[in-house]
Amino acid sequence: MAEMEETLDFNDILDDWFIESLKTYKDLHVYQLEHPTQVIEWTSGRTVCVAGYSSSKNEILELHLPLKLLADENKGLCAERDFKVVHGGFAEGPVCCLRHVPGTRCVVTNDGLSSDLQVWTVGGDDSDVIRRTGSVKGTRSVSAGGSRIAAPLSSQVLHGARSSDIQLTELTSGQSLYTLETDSAEPLSSLQFVSDAVFLAGGCNGDVYIADTRTSAAPQLCPGPASRGESVLWWTDASAGRVVRLSSSGRAVISDLRDLGEAVSAAQLDVQSRRCNLDDVRVSWAPALDDCIAVSGFSAAVQVYKTSVWSAERQDVRPLFEHRGHSVSSRSGDHVFATAHVWHPERPRTLLSAASDGSVHVWDWVDQSEL
Amino acid sequence: MPEIKVTPLGAGQDVGRSCILVSIGGKNIMLDCGMHMGYNDDRRFPDFSYITQNGRLTEFLDCVIISHFHLDHCGALPFMSEMVGYDGPIYMTHPTKAICPILLEDFRKITVDKKGETNFFTSQMIKDCMKKVVPLNLHQTVQVDDELEIKAYYAGHVLGAAMVQIKVGSESVVYTGDYNMTPDRHLGAAWIDKCRPDILISESTYATTIRDSKRCRERDFLKKVHESIERGGKVLIPVFALGRAQELCILLETFWERMNLKAPIYFSTGLTEKANHYYKLFITWTNQKIRKTFVQRNMFEFKHIKAFDRSYADNPGPMVVFATPGMLHAGQSLQIFKKWAGNEKNMVIMPGYCVQGTIGHKILNGQRKLEMEGRSTLDVKLQVEYMSFSAHADAKGIMQLIRMAEPRNMLLVHGEAVKMEFLKGKIEQEFSIDCHMPANGETATVTTNPSVPVDISLNLLKREMALGGPLPDPKRPRTMHGTLIMKENSLKLVSSEQALKELGLNEHQLRFTCRVQLQDPHSDPDTLNRIYTHLKSVLKGYTIQHLPDGTVMVESIVIKVSSSAEDTSTKVLLLSWSYQDEDLGSFLSTLLKKGLPSGLC
């Protein structure tokens, strides 16, 4: 009897949230994958790749977004709400990082255990297979934790697990084109290009390195924000000249890319700080929405914050929007965590998020402050 | 090796119609007989020429099984049975039998009356076809004939939908039809036992889809209805009495209650009478919740939903109306549509597929100007929404079903094998079973390994055990000697002696003898010795004995040496063997005729 009551409560809460969602979301899609993913990567404007992270064999899938979401005119006449699995492949180990090489049908993955990368080719129209076509050796032969991967607009890949082993590798030849010269060996939490040749590497201690792959000059090092002795991890994201750094205690700092030493604004985010691993938390700037960041990994929620209202002194802030779908629709409640999120490259308020229970949500939220 | 053959009828890549032929244990079964809704000509019917070039199908088919009442699964049935010709049994569940003829008649009316087609089945043909139907109950084994049996399992999806197991001897096939693995508001989820069929047949589209949750589809429905009501518009929902009407009513009722909404909701009475009638008849096919509700009250008794009167359509202000028929092709729903189409605040929500030729089909294709009777045109200004609520399994669901049934082989129809290498690999890896993907018109052949149970006599068993050696087990079969007696339906393995006794026959032994002349100057015993040595070196691996009674035995073949009376160096070898050792005996006589090698001592 108690079990039935519990089921009723769960359904009631779920129903409540769905009713509430009528006003808080324009579009909402809820999917259940067979196995959870901690990567979501755009491979085109309409397709994403996801992959499993269990310790043994895992699937890499390329999914086509539902037609109804993509339809602009005549949206009402399209009833198609499902993901289509267009390509799939098998990885021997977990997939912790997955990056699409722009302008190609290649993706590069890392298993989070060593710094080697696997190279895959996603089939065309005539095949549904994602095939392993190569590998890239990391500089360390001893496993030192996973590598971060960044890909510029060509068939080169920038990768590394620590600041001491960042290198730029030509995919087809395997040739190393550039290596970052630095003394420190800080594990990296992020690696991205901020222009064609200039990249930013974020260490987990909050330090940020900026370097140019065309020169062998030493990188510019910007130490992380003072942490008052707490041992925290830091994640970094850069976009349009601004950099956000987020700590595992929920502290966020915004700086200008040209002057990282100065904090433009700071805030204490409304998150439950917990013991995090390097792969847990994601922070990203919205590509099509001014001054907005999305944060996930502290719990099952994905939050959107508007940074333009932050002040220079660190104050508590509330999110502009919180997506609670993963916790509400999971029967395990507290034990579910959001593993990944991505913004849609063009639609301002559309995001995809994934959680540890295998759920994947696609949501287009309503900015209540604009109503 | 015994095999099962499966052929999806149809041509090239076309999907959207189900008609599959299965040949198992000498029996031929047709699974579903659907109409392809995208074609206007004969291509909409399955291509029966695969079965026979001309003439009736009765002698070629042992039975036809229909999984559920959707037209892409049963739409061509009257054409097949009455126009091509089939007089054998047609199996389907009770609800399917009750609902099929209604849908077929509606479909016929639209196609013939509205579109003026001629090569189509008539109302009488539908009736004659349904007379051949034998209804099925869930989980009940039905003997089609002495050897062929079928059983229906609950599939969910729509009222009366079934998955079917077809069995001949120890070979079986399960066909899923359309099914879903998660229960919804009025139907349960598909279920099957660990029946371990040789082949599980399902749709490839399931395996490549990840479905949006039911709740999100419902949310979209509520959102659209709510938005229209809020702006003062009217919402028309054309439904088929046994489609989603009941489910959508429950949904709206709950929503109205929660949000304290005041706008009226109506359903046409024809709709409720029919729906109540059928749900009452087939209550066991719905889910737990519906059954509980029904026991308490009439299924269409709602607080916020009332019976419709046609005068209400002219009332001002917002309202929601459920009306039949579902494709806006006639009747009340079309009347209401005509009144409301001109106002852009209004909305029509189509919850299902609409057949070509209907207004529903036209507006879902974006048509905004419709030609009505009497050459008048209707401007479609209201908002048109197409929503799909049909419950289908997806990639996760198909894996769950395979885990439930544990088939030895998987077969997916309506996909392109060339493009499905990953999917095939996934199923093969996860379950260690083969995955077949025949193209339309192509036959997939699956070899089976049926086990044939045979009784073994105790004497024979004891004798085999007495021979020693390891005990037989499934991984190490042992060869044995016996006689198989097939009497009536039983198979029995006995010793040869017992078989002869049972048959009243005497056992005879056949022995061959042969004389071979040999030149050898030694004494008889020495010659015999030399023969023994020679054979031992040539016939390695055989049991060769030199016995004290003056003979050499090779297995059971006896060799004796004696001298010719005239000349002691001319030896006569006497070889004697039984019929069983015929080959070896012949070999030995040929060998010895060649003489003994000189190098022997």
Image: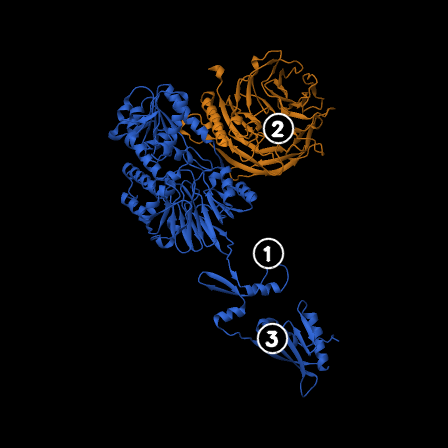
Chain colours: A orange, B blue
Going by the numbered disc 2, the residue's amino acid type is Ala
Q: Residue B248: give x, y in percent of width and height.
A: 38, 29
Instruction: State if disc 2 and disc 1 touch (CB < 8 Å).
Output: no
Which one is nearer the viewer's eye here, B175 or B360? B175
Q: Residue A276: give x, y in percent of width and height.
A: 64, 25
| Chain designation of label 3 | B
Residue at which label 2 appears: A151
Going by the numbered disc 1, the residue's amino acid type is Asp
Question: What is the secondary structure assignment of the residue under circle 3?
Answer: strand
Q: Which mark is residue B473?
A: 1
Which one is nearer the viewer's eye here, B206 or A227? A227
Q: Is residue B55 left or right of residue A305?
A: left
- Which is more foreground, mark 3 or mark 1? 1
Q: Residue A20: give x, y in percent of width and height.
A: 46, 22
> Along the polypeptide, which appears first: circle 3 or circle 1?
1
Going by the numbered disc 3, the residue's amino acid type is Trp
Which residue: 66% across, 16% down?
A: A260
Which one is nearer the viewer's eye here, B576 or B441? B576
- Which is more foreground, mark 1 or mark 2? 1
Q: Residue A73: give x, y in percent of width and height.
A: 42, 25
- Mark 1 vs mark 2: tell me if same chain: no
Q: CA distance from mark 3 to mark 1?
A: 35 Å
| Chain designation of label 2 | A
Q: CA distance from mark 1 to mark 2?
A: 58 Å
The quarter of the picture where residue B374 lies is top left
Residue at which label 3 appears: B577
| Chain designation of label 1 | B
Question: What is the secondary structure assignment of the residue under circle 2?
Answer: loop
In the image, is residue A196 above or below residue A307?
Answer: below
- Which is more foreground, mark 2 or mark 3? 3
Instruction: State if disc 3 and disc 2 touch (CB < 8 Å).
Output: no
In the image, is residue B241 above or below residue A351?
Answer: below
